Image: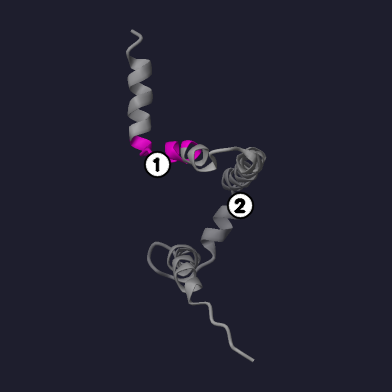
Amino acid sequence: MKKITNWYSIPYFLWVFLFVLAPVSLILYQSFFDIEGQLTLDNYKTFFGNWTYLRMSFNSVIYAAVITLVTLVISYPTAFILTKMKHKQLWLMLIILPTWINLLLKAYAFMGLFGQQG
């Protein structure tokens, strides 16, 4: 039997490790220490004992869920319609092109459009 090794997945796993797992692990590790570097659980006591922190965390989860749901509702029908159209590459480019524009450039354009009305 021939052993199949997929070398193309190495960059993906490296990316996930460097930019997801490593930062989360470092934050989790640092959360067990106070400002002087002493091992403590006071950070967790403060977090779970303060309703403001819990409410902010809950709101973040709710916002993430709503954004995910809206994205799915918009993107799946768009992808389905795109597969049925002629000139698929052109329409795909027109859909993706605005995401290539820098956020700062978008902000300047927005301010320029609405700043000229006075």
The residue positioned farthest toward the top in the image shown: 118
Marking on residue 100: 1
Q: Position of residue 59 (x, y in %)?
A: 61, 42
Q: Position of residue 31 (x, y in %)?
A: 49, 63
The residue positioned farthest toward the bottom in the image shown: 1
Which badge, 1 or 2, comes first in the chain's sequence? Answer: 2
Q: For residue 112, which quarter of the picture?
A: top left
Apparent side of residue 107 relative to residue 22 in the rendered image (left or right): left
Report the residue at 64% width, 92% height from top: 1
The answer to whether 27 is drawn above or below residue 10 in the figure is above
From which residue to which does the magenta span run?
Answer: 94-104
Report the residue at 44% width, 70% height from top: 11
Report the residue at 39% width, 62% height from top: 35
Report the residue at 53% width, 39% height from top: 87
* Disc 1 versus disc 2: nearer the observer: 1
Q: Nearer the viewer, residue 58 or 92?
A: 92
Q: Secondary structure at mark 2?
A: helix
- Mark 2 = which residue? 49
| C-alpha distance separating marks 1 and 2 | 43 Å
- The kind of residue on which mark 2 rests is Gly
Q: Secondary structure at mark 1?
A: helix
Q: Main secondary structure of the magenta part?
A: helix
Q: For residue 111, which quarter of the picture?
A: top left
The answer to whether 39 is drawn above or below residue 57 in the figure is below
Question: Quick one: quadrant of the C terminus?
Answer: top left
Apparent side of residue 109 relative to residue 81 in the rendered image (left or right): left
Q: Position of residue 105 (x, y in %)?
A: 33, 33
Magenta span contains residue 54: no
The answer to whether 86 is drawn above or below residue 44 in the figure is above
